[in-house]
Amino acid sequence: MSEIKSTLDLVMERTRSLTMTPEEKEEARKKELTGRIRGLFQKRKNGSISLETMKSELEKLGDRKLAGEVLADELAGDFIPDAPNATWMDIVEAFFPSRLKKADLVMGRCRKELDEINRREIEDAKNSWRKKGIEGPALVPNPHRSESWKKGMDDILARCRKEIRSALGFTK
């Protein structure tokens, strides 16, 4: 009678001759480190680890260049102009101290552009209502419902995130 093999035995038997090329090994290493770096960023953002812990854990990983790229991606992707960004700025200051001022300027400019879109959409809505004979202090336009506002916001956020990544010293 033949022996019943476990799934693990079958997998090991079939993959015995497979090996990874150096490029595949490097890609796997980068993917693993990227996941760890993103996890540390999320933990810091959520407040479950301190900035010092994040720094020491990133030092242990060893790949400063990759850590910088991943952090720049995460910071740019996480940028929300009208949200409190204290943790965000702490991370920029800790890991990109020479770029802090430039990143802050980009954030300020992005906030102004977004404020301008809001102001313009509110004014357009009021003008539209005025033309229809609708006026009064109780009317409060909601620019978030406008398709042009959504498109403008998406465009500005995409550009701002790209500028932030560049301000941090990385381009994609």
Image (cartoon, rainbow, N blue to C red):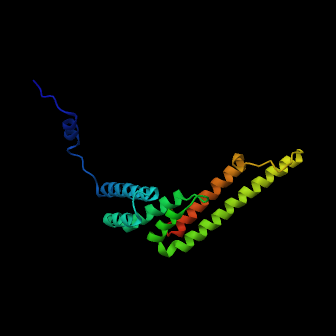
Residue placed furthest toward the front: 138
Front residue of 2/109: it is: 109
Identify the residue at horizontal 64%, vertical 67% (top origin).
109
Which x, y percent locates residue 9? 18, 37
Picture quarter containing residue 53? bottom left
- Judge left or right: residue 37 versus residue 145: left
Residue 171 can be seen in this image? no
Residue placed furthest toward the left: 1
Which x, y percent locates residue 125? 79, 50
- Judge left or right: residue 161 versus residue 96: right
Which x, y percent locates residue 129? 84, 47
Residue placed furthest toward the top: 1
- Judge left or right: residue 130 versus residue 111: right
Front residue of 105/161: it is: 105
Picture quarter containing residue 80? bottom right
Identify the residue at horizontal 67%, vertical 50% (top origin).
150
Report how many numbered discs are placed on residues in the image.
0
Residue 155 can be seen in this image? yes
Front residue of 11/60: it is: 60
- In which quadrant is the N terminus drawn? top left
Which x, y percent locates residue 37? 39, 59
